[in-house]
Image (tube, grey):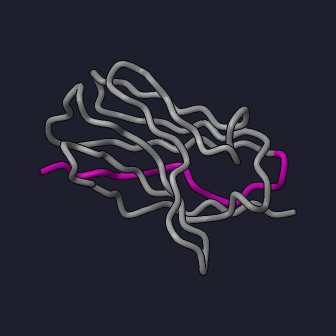
Amino acid sequence: QVRLVESGGGLVQAGGSLRLSCAASGMIFSFDIMGWHRQAPGNQRELVATITGGGSTVYADSVKDRFAISRDNAKNTVTLQMNNLKPEDTAVYYCNILRRGLNYWGQGTQVTVSS
């Protein structure tokens, strides 16, 4: 079992930056895919970015060149640096681990971007 705790959300003006962090308890394996998803009111949860144990990344088109995901395997953490934030980035952001077909989720952290 793994427990994920996010931090770093908040309110920011458009064009600003936020850094989200996720700390994972329990064993984290190199084959785990760690990532961030988000869900805005009335929308489905969507993938934002993922990173493998080897450092390969995937980003949603809407955040490419603005967001950067990183992972510290020794500290069991995954971080999302968000720059040039836009009002449409407003959502609850969830940390995620995909392990052999099973998804583990954090409780979510709110990000609000004002125009």
Q: Position of residue 5 (x, y in %)?
A: 34, 52
Which sits in the foreground, 96 or 115?
96
Residue 9 covered by magenta stretch: yes
Above/below status of 112 relative to 1: below
Vertical relation: 1 (above or below) 56: below
Q: Nearer the viewer, residue 25 or 32?
A: 32
**Residue at figure coordinates x 48%, y 36% from the top left:** 79
Magenta range is 1-15
Image-based side of 21 in relation to 15, left or right = left
* Left or right of residue 76, residue 2 in this image: left
Please state if 84 lies on the left or on the right of 1 as rendered: right
Q: Position of residue 40 (x, y in %)?
A: 60, 70
Residue at 79%, 42% (x, y): give it.
84
Q: Position of residue 95 (x, y in %)?
A: 41, 51
Count all numbered tags in the image, as a single digit: 0
Does 84 sit above or below residue 91? above
Quadrant of the image occupied by residue 22? top left
**Residue situated in front as seen by the camera: 8 or 81:** 81
Give the vertical position of 112 relative to 52 (above or below). Answer: below
- Classify residue 28 by image quadrant: top left
Majority secondary structure in the magenta region: strand
Q: Is residue 56 left or right of residue 98?
A: right
